[in-house]
Amino acid sequence: MPTLRIDQREISVPQGTKVIEAAEKLGIMIPRFCYHPALGSLGACRMCAVKFMEGPVKGVEMSCMVEAADGMVVSTTDPEAMEFRRYVIEWLMLNHPHDCPICDAGGQCLLQDETVSGGHGLRRYQGLKRTFEDQYLGEFVQHEMNRCIHCWRCRRFYQEFAGYFDYGAMQIGNRMYFGRFAPGPLESPFAGNIIDLCPTGVLTDKPSRYKGRRWDLQRGPSLCLHCSLGCNLVGSARYREMIRVEARFHGAVNGYFICDRGRYGFAYANHPDRPRQARVGEEAAPLDQALKTAAQRLGQIRERYGPGAVAAWGSTRSSLETLGMLQWLCQDQGWRGPQFFPQASLARRVKAAVARLDTGMAVSLRDLENADFIVVAGADPVQEAPMLALALRQAARRGATVAVIDPRPVFLPLEYEHLPVSPGDIDLCLNLLSQAARSEEAATGKLEPDAARFYGLLTSTNLEDPLLQERLLALGRKLQDCLRPVIVCNTDMVRETTPARAADQARLLQADKGQAGLFYLLPGPNAYGAALLAGREEVDLLAAMEQGGVKALVVVENDPLGSCPDQERLLRALDNLELLVGLDYLPSATAARSQIFLPTTTVFEKEFSHFINQEGRLQQAVPLHQGGTPIIQVGQGSHPPRTFLDAIPGGEPRPGAGILADLAAALSGEPAPPTAGDLWDYLSGEHEGFSQLASLTASALGEGVHLLPAEAQEPAWSPEPGEKPPEPPAGQLELLLVDQTFGTEELGSYAAPLQKVEEEPHLLLHTDLAADLGLAPGEQVALLLPGGEVTVRLQTAQNMAPGVAIMPRHRRLHWQKTGDGPVWLPPENIKKLSEPL
Amino acid sequence: MSTLPPELQTELAQQVAAADHPREQVINIMYVLQKHYGYMSDEAVEEAAALLDMTPLEVEELATFYDFIYREAVGKFVIHVCDGVVCWMFHEGSVFDYLCEKLGVCAGGVSADGMFTVLPSACLGFCDHAPAMLINGVFYGHLNPEKIDAILEKLRREYCDLVICR
Ligand code: SF4
Ligand code: SF4
Ligand code: FES
Ligand code: FES
């Protein structure tokens, strides 16, 4: 631990710390452009010059390039260092245009700040400025190359950190140009981060252009709801419109970055068709009146048919407050439910996963970066939870082996091994990997009895493909030498046994190596919370509705018509209802069908809300504004109407939890069911996973709390690891419904900027299989599903499992025709409709 | 689809296959393609990228970094005039300006007869013969206007095969 003095203050820092970082620990922000904590030092800009007065280094040097050492005495304010920096900033400004007033970075620009703080107030340079032509970089990033100061941050992130290679640095010296080989959309789904990184206005946020200066915006800490990782955001609103989202640093979750789905998905909150008014039948009604009518009608149904005739269906995108209140309401009223997942099988997989996480097992995204062997089982990170791919890349950059066991043609921006096996073989692959990773003698000699017994039960059937088998065993041998393995597993497309099996294997690795981690992906930003609330009980509302036992359904921030894989069955079941009450902030099909509709707020509006990410971390989103119809929509682009109102137009929506609380009060005639504070008390009694909630302070909630239990709820080992999950009948294909980075995730599919970049939906088949069926990529095909026909364009791939057909749950594809559970199709069910375009 | 002659394609593919890491061959491949196209055209960049399993951008980063890769069409002879400190000290007037004036071109331009391109270059390592220049791989030192005139005349008249860098 070297100890040094910076500006007369002493500090000890770990070996290898740069002087610029040591100063930051003292609260001294040395000016910088090229240095960034996530990207490291480069020494390109010369802005961080300080004077070394005593010690091993002498004179003016770059504080980002010099490691702190014992005996150093550093001055950041020495006249010589200050003069040096004044010249550097003047020199960096030589070519910089005088366009701050029309620059979207103005007011949020490191170059502005450091020009002023560096003491460069008057331009002395009279010559011509170097100029460039800008490029079209896609829908997200605006390019203004004349403003570049050559700090290299964008390129270092884009290529080194994120692993995409279509953007970089060209030319030399003063002409150095940051851009693409030719104009065109940036290919990386992490491209938006270069906007946050660029210290000047070269790379700015395109969708929010000209919409406001930073000081005009209502900004605050928020959360991303577009997958289960729970990345931290700063959200900005202005004139009742959500304008922009930036990454917010979180050491354990997303670091400094977010993905583009998270950055541009927020626009659902501004959707022009967003329902902002309560409705009874066809008639708009004031919210409290609609709420009373709902209570009345629900009460009548309860009276006529009993409490079980009312059911509640929520979703994993609601805050913990709303989920908790819905749970409370069901218990209080004796309603059926709530159900939180679109299908019973998904609920089982998620619960199986959540029940296996504990403090000894779960790892964060940041921990993952330090793993040395990562097995990704049944997950496609870039498509499902993009920031996971970025964490995997950091692990790979530190030398980790990444093995992906997944039927899809998975692409990752890093070096990885992909074993394209069908979902039914994933468990077997995990078994084989475990077996290859340790010799049986060692295992039986060293492992605890339980682990040894489990190990003994592992089957040793071989994979059909000997080549894959060999690769798997080679990976297993590599795993033998690794010390910090992690198993990543999604709960979406895998067999019901797989989440538990992944946990078993992780536990076995832990028993063997003393250290191993488990990382699940879950469906939705609050799936963890929903799984805890759902408890062990199975709810299958669809079946109950079909049997006619349910007469009224309350659907809370949920669109079963969009997410239920068997829409026809659902429609029939909905027809059996006497009453459908909907609460939502999305203009969904279910919202439109509701007889009584109550509008709720988004995560950005009115009240604090909390979500639990896939590793059990409770995090808080702060309301940014009061909501209401954006002024730009009220005025239809021109000045808003000059009428005086005492309420915000479109400002009626309220947080789901509050509406549900009022509903409960109206139903029971008693005021004040548990609200706010008491809700935490109620939840902490509801499940031991919530037990910490009752005692949390406001500041702890703000920072985020890990709710993981010390010991997982489920006994560690599955009883029958050898048992093979059901297999498709011979010659049939398994249809896999999957996610795509853009176009399948519910909230984002209502966001205009994401709609512009989503890929066309397509059906994916193995190249050889397509050829056997006489089909060619690009052709339009009809896919005959249990619930009817889907027309879709065909694509083929070599690097996927041969026996599967892959289709995204794309918003523009009517995929809800499959039914629950694995779908097996005879290949004749895919028919050619037209020649390729 | 590649538009290169099949023999060249095979030759390049072999060169790439023989390397431990394909991308270590990038400079050599660029030289071959530059020789084939006359300069490193956009098409050549894309060819190189496809051969080396790199993106065109990655090839472009290197192509625009090195002095001897020409991303625009050049004359038959490319004159790299030394722009190094020692040569400055020995310039009587400027060799660079003299050449530009004489050939009627600006830096990087091609003379009307298609014969010459003039480019500045970092120290050529020929300082003991300053001021110096390099034309298609051949050094010329102790330059003065008369000597330059003679060199240009000779190049115009005589066929020269010493095309090393293109
Ligand atoms: S574009 Fe921005 S981030 Fe990239 S080098 Fe220029 S100033 Fe730095
Ligand atoms: S990885 Fe998931 S949580 Fe993170 S920004 Fe992207 S969509 Fe949001
Ligand atoms: S921050 Fe140190 S040289 Fe740029
Ligand atoms: S300075 Fe011209 S050759 Fe070295």
Image: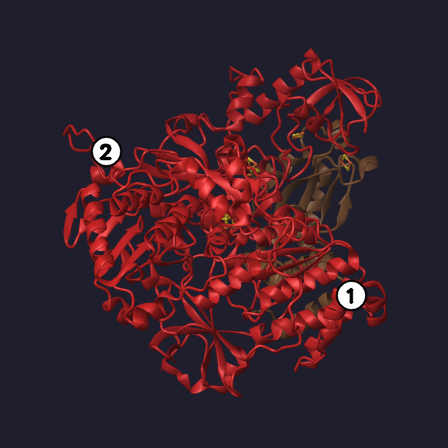
Helix, strand or loop status at disc 2: loop
Tell me, what hue is chain A?
red
Q: Residues within 10 Å of mark 2 (few under 14, many from 20)?
A: few
Q: Chain of mark 1?
A: A
The residue pinned by badge 1 equals A449
Q: Position of residue B85 (x, y in %)?
A: 75, 30
Left or right for B92, reference A546: right
Q: Is residue A429 left or right of residue A631?
A: right
Which badge, 2 or 1, is on the more N-terminal residue?
Answer: 1
Mark 2 and mark 1, same subunit?
yes
Residue type at mark 1 is Pro
Ligand 4 shows up in which quadrant of the image? top right
Kind of residue sitting beneath label 2: Ile
For the residues bearing labels 2 and 1, Cβ distance under 8 angstroms: no
Quarter where residue A792 is shown: bottom left
Q: Nearer the viewer, mark 2 or mark 1?
A: 1
Q: How many marks?
A: 2
Q: Which residue sits furthest top?
A: A79
Asked if residue B161 can be seen in this view, the reply is no
Picture colour for chain B: brown
User: What residue is at 64 percent from the left and 40 percent from the top?
Assistant: A39
Q: Secondary structure at mark 1?
A: helix
Residue A374 seen from this side:
yes
Which residue position holds label 2? A648
> Would residue A284 appear left or right of A733 to someone viewing this image?
left
